[in-house]
Image (tube, rainbow, N blue to C red):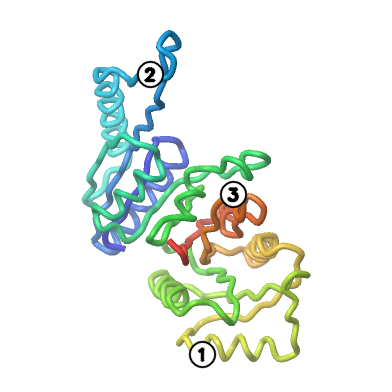
Amino acid sequence: MKSLLVPCDFSPESREAYQFALQLAARTQGLVHVLKAVDLPVMYESALGAAPFYFDPTLIKELKDDAKAQFEKMKAEFPTEVKTEFFVQEGPVTPTIRQFIKEHSIDLVVMGTRGATGLEEYLIGSNTEKVVRFSPVPVFAIRRAPKLDSIKNIVFPTTFETSDQLVREVRGLQEFFQAKLHLLMINTPYNMERRADEPDRLKAFAEKHGLSNFTINTRDEFRESSAIMNFAVEINADMIAMGTHGRRGLSHLFSGSIAEKVVNHTDCPIWTLSLHA
């Protein structure tokens, strides 16, 4: 967590993400990149049919100057010795963030979220959800920034087939926060694998991956996302760490993403790693 990216529109949620990123960077002696993506829609002159009309360069400059002024104001509000750099780039938010990650060797994205409900959740979603699905590096989704020292209990939804990479990353998170890990196995009507030896298999799974300071938990629930959120409330979790498969197109429309649903409806920080980014 040495090179952090905070996509920022200066909303209350993105300001919370900025504060959390500053804490992470202070502990790791890292660098915080703050990115404002200016997404300018293309308009069309009705008299000319399909001829595109782009915004005047003067307007674009004013938007960039305003973003810089907002960053300086935010920076003054949260003084820190952490090194920060501010960037303004034109383009659609999610592709701009993905490109920035590659160009600046980002290893963690910290992004504010206010969630989504109803048709917005299923048809549009938020920029944070899209980044969660498609980011090539881990993403922290933040609604309210906690103090780092307050993160003591991390929920880790898992299966016996969970990838080695994901387990390694979560183990690193646990060590970073010096927290207890709560392994959670969920059985649903579509994935019912209840067996008497399930806790023993989970324990063997944890030992295989070198995990320590953990609890083993199983839940029967209709939906995985509901089980994760209910369990997090039950144990008063400080963070949830999980993988996402980054579904696209019709698969995403009809099946959705468990990680997205958790991001949409949970207040505690959510750490995600896309397994197919």
> Would residue 273 be seen by someone viewing this image from the given angle?
no
* Residue drawn at x 60%, y 42% as measured from the top left: 116
Quadrant in the picture for residue 204: bottom right
Q: CA distance from mark 3 to mark 2?
A: 39 Å
Callout 3 crowding tier (Cα within 10 Å): few <14, some 14–19, many ≥20: many
Relative horizontal placement of residue 86, taking residue 231 as reference (left or right) = left
Residue at mark 2? 51
Q: Which residue is mark 3?
A: 264
Image quarter for residue 171?
bottom left
**Residue tagged by mark 1?**
207
Q: Earlier in the sequence, mark 3 or mark 2?
A: 2
Label 2's element?
loop
Q: Is residue 215 left or right of residue 192?
A: left
Inter-mark Cα distance, 2 to 1: 63 Å
Of labels 3 and 1, earlier in sequence is: 1
**Going 72% across and 62% down the picture, which residue do you hit?**
223
Mark 2 or 1: in front is 2
**Tag 3: amino acid:** Asn
Q: Quadrant of the N terminus?
A: bottom left
Amino acid at circle 1: Glu
